[in-house]
Amino acid sequence: MRNSTMVEVRIKCPRCGESLMDEDRQIDGHPSICAEGYFEGNRGRIWMSSLYGSYNVESELDVPEGDVTEFSCPKCGESLNSTRSCELCKAPMVPFGFAEGGVVQICSRKGCRRHLVEFSDIRAELRSFLDSYSAFF
Ligand SMILES: [Zn+2]
Ligand SMILES: [Zn+2]
């Protein structure tokens, strides 16, 4: 069966393994992915669409395009920004775990859509679907 509906991904913290899905805060009609952000002395929640390929984001932080946000887990408080840097803009990449297995790394710079998907044992059909996308968030 084929349709044009985007796949909803379930995301967990790569550090503590807790789900980052916020069932109460919906974006694109689906539960969002909730992370904590830190920018210029302010801390706030960031909600990202869980639909792969959607860039819809809501945030308590007012981050201008081109600036870098420090991401952390709202559950364990650990920083999520990694030492790996974006190939395009050199900002730190931020890893998020797929509940099904595998990791997606997104760029922490607002407006940069670089992402990397790294699979371990993610379901094959989800993998081929995600491989066909070149953009995330
Ligand atoms: Zn955590
Ligand atoms: Zn980047």
Image (cartoon, rainbow, N blue to C red):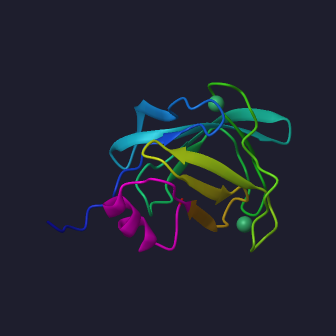
Residue 112: image location, x then y, percent: 67, 67
- Kindly indicate the quadrant of the structure image that contains residue 17: top right
* Left or right relative to 37: residue 22: left
Residue extending farthest to the right is 41
Q: Quadrant of the N terminus?
A: bottom left
On screen, residue 124 above or below 10:
below
Residue extending farthest to the front is 121
Magenta segment: 118-136
* Near-viewer residue (66 or 52): 52
Residue extending farthest to the left is 1
- Kindly indicate the quadrant of the structure image that contains residue 117: bottom right
- Kindly indicate the quadrant of the structure image that contains residue 124: bottom left
Q: Quadrant of ligand 2?
A: bottom right
Was residue 123 drawn as part of the magenta stretch in this picture?
yes
* Near-viewer residue (4 or 1): 1
The residue depicted at 76 percent of the width and 47 percent of the height is 81
* Left or right relative to 84: residue 133: left
* Near-viewer residue (15 or 10): 15
